[in-house]
Amino acid sequence: MSFGFGNVITFSYIGERSHDSKPKVLVLHPNWKRNVHGLNLKYVPTNYVELIKFLSQKDFNNMKDKNLQKQYYRWKNLMPPKLSSIIIYNTFVSRILPIRKAYRKYVPAKMSGVRILKTKL
């Protein structure tokens, strides 16, 4: 199954340090240095899910949490016309602790039963 940046996937995972055998992941990069990089949505606090959602949309006026909307507009000058996994990591994942704690790398050989839940979050 082919998935890419912005897809939400779920799969079975058996790893030495894995605490979640069935992660639900927002894919940041499907093959960076032979690993799948993403955010395990089970570890993202619910109030940050909206912040992650806006990464894949263009209209932010309907964002329910006005504080997150203000954060977006504070960062919008950093955003290029086209988002990429490196930009998302440098702009959001590395700067926001609750999101950084959800960042994971997965070895593709240890992933099985991959299903795309949504083409975009």
Image: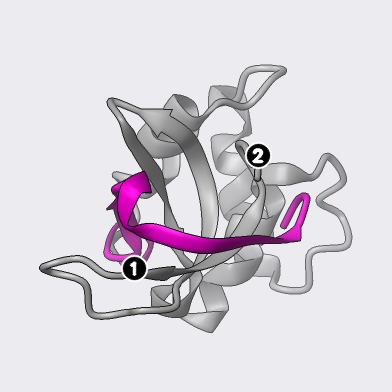
Numbered-mark total? 2
Q: Which residue is mark 1?
A: 98
Residue in view at x 62 percent, y 37 percent: 4
Identify the secondary structure beneath mark 2: loop
Specify the quadrant of the image occupied by residue 32: top left
Q: What is the number of the mark on residue 60?
A: none
Q: Which residue is mark 2?
A: 2
Give me the C-alpha separation between circle 1 and circle 2. 28 Å
**Disc 1 or disc 2, which is closer to the eye?**
2
Span highlighted in magenta in the image: 98-121
Identify the secondary structure beneath mark 1: helix
On the picture, is 19 further left or further right than 13? left
Looking at the image, is 90 positioned above or below residue 82?
Answer: below
**Amino acid type shown at disc 2:** Ser
On the picture, is 97 further left or further right than 89? left
**Amino acid type shown at disc 1:** Pro
Is 119 one of the magenta-colored residues?
yes
Specify the quadrant of the image occupied by residue 36: top left
Residue placed most toward the observer, 45 or 24: 24
Residue in view at x 31 percent, y 57 percent: 110
Q: Residues within 10 Å of mark 2 (few under 14, many from 20)?
A: few
Q: Quadrant of the N terminus?
A: top right
Specify the quadrant of the image occupied by residue 113: bottom right
Provide residue 28's location: percent of width, then percent of height: 50, 41
Q: Which badge, 1 or 2, is on the more N-terminal residue? A: 2
Residue placed most toward the observer, 15 or 40: 15
Looking at the image, is 66 positioned above or below residue 35?
Answer: below
Residue in view at x 23 percent, y 80 percent: 19
Residue placed most toward the observer, 57 or 20: 20
Q: Residues within 10 Å of mark 1 (few under 14, many from 20)?
A: some
